[in-house]
Image: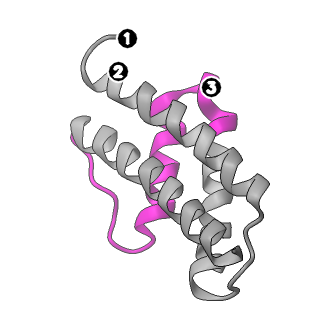
Amino acid sequence: MAADWDWGFAVAYNAVLQASRAYMFAQGFRPASVEAHKNTFAFMRLAMGKDYEELIAYFDRMRNKRNQAIYDVAGLITETEARNLFSRAAGFVKLIRSRLSGKL
């Protein structure tokens, strides 16, 4: 069962990453190919402003955790971690969709 939480965590993380990249591209930017995930979250921290600084910092921490779970340690992610990321990711994707469609 542990591998399922790892995979679910990775999928939720990817949703956040892809939403962030869409927002970044819509603003006319692209992340450098070296450390692209890290650079994407650095951009988002600036682009989203102080109100979202804590959330973006959380996603950046999860970037490191996802890297460990995918490349180093199977079974690293707990059910609680996966569900927490999924919940935050769903809200974030909704926010980005709203911003991209001009509703905010």
Seen in the picture, residue 43 relative to 9 is either above or below; the reply is above
Location of mark 2 (residue): 98
The kind of residue on which mark 3 rests is Lys
> Gap between marks 3 and 2, in whole Å?
19 Å
Q: Residue furthest bottom?
A: 72
Seen in the picture, residue 30 relative to 24 is either above or below; the reply is below
- Expressed as whole percent of the image width and height from the top left, the position of residue 8 reads 56, 62
Identify the residue at image location x=60%, y=29%.
Answer: 52
Disc 3 on helix, strand or loop? helix
Disc 1 and disc 2 in contact, CB within 8 angstroms: yes
Location of mark 3 (residue): 50
Question: Going by the image, does 61 lie left or right of 22?
Answer: right
Mark 1, other Cα within 10 Å: few <14 / some 14–19 / many ≥20: few
Instruction: Choose the circle earlier in sequence order: 1 or 3.
Output: 3
- Expressed as whole percent of the image width and height from the top left, the position of residue 24 reads 32, 43
Seen in the picture, residue 72 relative to 97 is either above or below; the reply is below
> Gap between marks 1 and 3, in whole Å?
16 Å
> Gap between marks 1 and 2, in whole Å?
6 Å
Q: Main secondary structure of the magenta part?
A: helix
Q: Residue furthest top?
A: 103
- What is the number of the mark on residue 104? 1
Identify the residue at image location x=51%, y=51%.
Answer: 41
Give the number of the mark in front: 3 or 2.
2
The magenta region covers 28-55
- Expressed as whole percent of the image width and height from the top left, the position of residue 39 reads 46, 58
Disc 1 and disc 3 in contact, CB within 8 angstroms: no
Nearest the viewer among 85 and 29 is 85
